[in-house]
């Protein structure tokens, strides 16, 4: 069976499904370009308000395909470097994408699959899902932004233990740590992720885009620069038609209709 990234619509949400069930949805270069293309389509479509990334069947993603990595050891280093650059292009596209991206995790979420989930804006995970930064278990170092994401989400010692020891960690503990948002019943992660997406879809897209952009900037800038950016976003959003609708709806005690 050929590995692929499948796409379908669920209301105003685009669902991207990692499809490689024979290998627990291991990632491959064919998925990276497809992921970037899908997000480019979603960004330009006013019909799409959010994106959910999930895995086919009972697993989210087992990370990289070890057989492919073993074969790449016989190739020039540039072959693997190009593959990782493609993955990183997808990761950066998710981060810069102006609409909410939610990971819906069942079963295994390992290696680059864990990195992919961390790149999303929110994570919904089944109670019995298992996360592992498995790189060091096979004498490799992380990719997909794992070090960037975990060192910002967790204390340094905790993040480095996960990265260096390759320990398995469950969804409940990650929720306690603030890494994931919601723990679902087994088999319900996608349903709950779509419900979360529907809540976001009902909000003003321009405001959510501003919040995501400000959130991306916050850890890498000074307070003074962040305050200036918040001012500019606020003024721009106040003069957007959605602010007029939102304020009027609040005063009229009715549900707003944003565009």
Image (cartoon, rainbow, N blue to C red):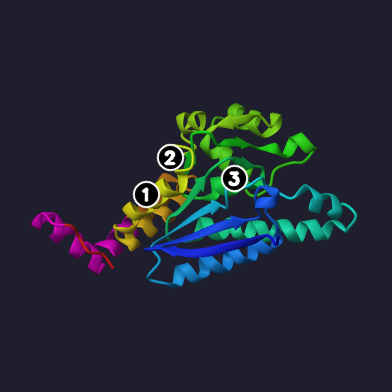
Q: Nearer the viewer, mark 2 or mark 1?
A: 1
The picture places residue 154, in percent across and down from the top left corner, at 53, 33
State the separation of the CA atoms marked 2 and 3: 18 Å
Residue identifier under label 2: 181
SS class, disc 2: loop
- Residue span colored magenta: 231-254
The residue wearing badge 3 is 59
| Magenta highlight: main SS | helix
Front residue of 163 and 3: 3
Label 3: element kind: loop
Residue 230 rendering spot, x and y as whole percentages: 35, 53
Residue, x 70% and y 37% (percent of image)?
Answer: 134
Q: Residue at image x 59%, y 36%?
A: 131
Q: In this rendering, is residue 27 above or below 148?
A: below
Q: Which residue is mark 1?
A: 196
Would you say the residues marked 2 and 3 are in contact, meaning their CB atoms lie under 8 Å apart? no
Near-viewer residue (128 or 167): 128
Label 3 neighbour load within 10 Å: few <14, some 14-19, many 20+: many
Say which of 239 and 227 sits in front: 239
Between circles 2 and 3, the one closer to the viewer is 3
Label 2 and label 1: CA atoms lie apart by 10 Å
Mark 3 and mark 1 lie on one chain; the one further toward the N terminus is 3
Magenta stretch encompasses residue 239:
yes
Instruction: Out of 201 and 86, give the one closest to the viewer.
Output: 201
């Amino acid at each position: 069976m050929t590995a692929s990234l499948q796409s379908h619509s669920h209301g105003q949400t685009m669902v991207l499904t990692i499809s490689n069930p024979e290998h627990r949805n291991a990632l491959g270069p064919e998925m990276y370009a497809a992921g970037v293309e899908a997000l480019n389509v979603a960004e330009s479509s006013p019909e799409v308000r959010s994106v959910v990334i999930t895995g086919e069947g009972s697993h989210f993603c087992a990370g990289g395909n070890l057989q492919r990595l073993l074969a790449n050891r016989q190739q020039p280093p540039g072959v693997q470097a190009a593959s990782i650059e493609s993955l990183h292009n997808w990761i950066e596209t998710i981060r810069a994408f102006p609409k909410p991206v939610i990971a819906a995790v069942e079963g295994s979420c390992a290696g680059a699959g864990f990195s992919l989930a961390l790149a999303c804006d929110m994570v919904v995970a089944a109670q019995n899902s298992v996360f592992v930064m498995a790189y060091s278990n096979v004498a490799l170092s992380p990719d997909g932004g794992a070090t960037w994401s975990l060192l910002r989400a967790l204390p340094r010692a905790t993040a480095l233990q996960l990265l260096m020891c390759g320990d398995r960690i469950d969804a409940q503990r990650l929720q306690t740590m603030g890494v994931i948002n919601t723990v679902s019943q087994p088999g319900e992660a996608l349903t709950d992720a779509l419900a979360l997406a529907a809540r976001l879809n009902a909000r003003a897209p321009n405001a959510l885009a501003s919040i995501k952009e400000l959130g991306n900037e916050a850890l890498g800038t000074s307070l003074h620069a962040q305050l200036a950016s918040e001012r500019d976003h606020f003024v721009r959003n106040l003069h957007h038609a959605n602010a007029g609708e939102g304020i009027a709806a609040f005063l009229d005690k009715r549900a707003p209709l944003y565009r």
